[in-house]
Image: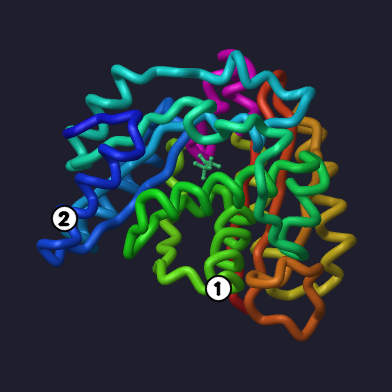
Amino acid sequence: MQTTQDIDTLRATISAWRQQGLKIAFVPTMGNLHQGHITLVEKAKSVADKVVASIFVNPMQFGANEDIDNYPRTMAADQEKLLAAGCELLFTPTPSIIYPKGLDKQSYVEVPNVSDGYCGESRPGHFRGVSTVVCKLFNLVQPDIACFGLKDYQQVQVIQTMVEDLSMPIEIIPVATVREDSGLALSSRNNYLTDEEKKIAPALAQNIQWLAKEIVNNNDFIGLAKQAADYIDNAGLKTDYIHICHARTLQPASEDDKELVILAAAHCGKARLIDNLQVFL
Ligand code: PAF
């Protein structure tokens, strides 16, 4: 696996592949890779000839109160995992390579509506940072396909909408969430959980499951979501939000909607956990 920080080297390697008519799939990450990321690389490998990954802890998607400096960085272990999973090219830029003029002077991409609520509300500016960096990475890599984990369901909708709205010729493949046996969704943020917190963290996924069963026969979506929030809080977490939404627009679900998603976030100690479940009625 070739690893480079350099944009010209990245472009030269990819352009040589393109000249050979090879199909390229891309997996953007912020590193600290776990089985969820590796599943993305494996999916990418199964649908393309060459897999490109990136590791970039994107300062634009962190809020002023969020501790980017302590975000886990595990480059050597990540490289080993990517190599074993079949990645051929890894791009590891620094912030000054991605944002040479600094964040304040950087043009940005904003995707309205789907970015607005839920994590967009709890983390102002987060999705602007995500859509901007993903747009920029897409322009650098120019993949045919890009794989994203459904654990970040709202992020997938933001990126899918950006690709459609800006006519980017890239197929977005959403990949199912990988979970521990307890149901807890794998996340780099699980590293922040103590042993005690690990025991209660699965309450988020468990209550989403409960809610998914309830909404099949009861369309009091707001009342049921409130009940689920109470159960999550009673388990020792602190619910940030839990909502039943239209699966594509992410607007609050109406009783006529058939394709729904439950979106939820909760604090567990120092970790802010997010999770979701699609429900087809
Ligand atoms: O999901 C992530 O790891 C990040 O939000 C992404 C898509 C790599 C953009 O920085």
Residue type beneath disc 2? Trp
Q: Which badge, 2 or 1, comes first in the chain's sequence?
A: 2
Q: Which residue appears farthest toward the bottom when viewing the image? A: 256
Q: Nearer the viewer, residue 278 or 125?
A: 125
Q: Is residue 58 above or below residue 142?
A: above
What range of the chain is rendered magenta? Answer: 182-201
Residue 249 in the image: state x and y as whole percent.
70, 71
Visible in this render: residue 231? Answer: no
What label sits on residue 164 in the rendered view? 1
In the figure, is residue 92 to the left or right of 60?
left
The residue located at (77%, 51%) in the rendering is 118
Q: Is residue 125 above or below residue 217?
A: above
Visible in this render: residue 79? Answer: yes
Q: Which residue is mark 2?
A: 17
The residue located at (45%, 41%) in the rendering is 179
When asked about the image quadrant of residue 58, the answer is: top right
Residue type beneath disc 1? Glu
Does the segment drawn in magenta span residue 190? yes
In the figure, is residue 48 to the left or right of 102?
left
What label sits on residue 79 in the rendered view? none
Helix, strand or loop for disc 1: helix
Q: Is mark 2 within 8 Å of ligand 1?
A: no
Total number of numbered labels? 2
Q: Residues within 10 Å of mark 1 (few under 14, many from 20)?
A: few
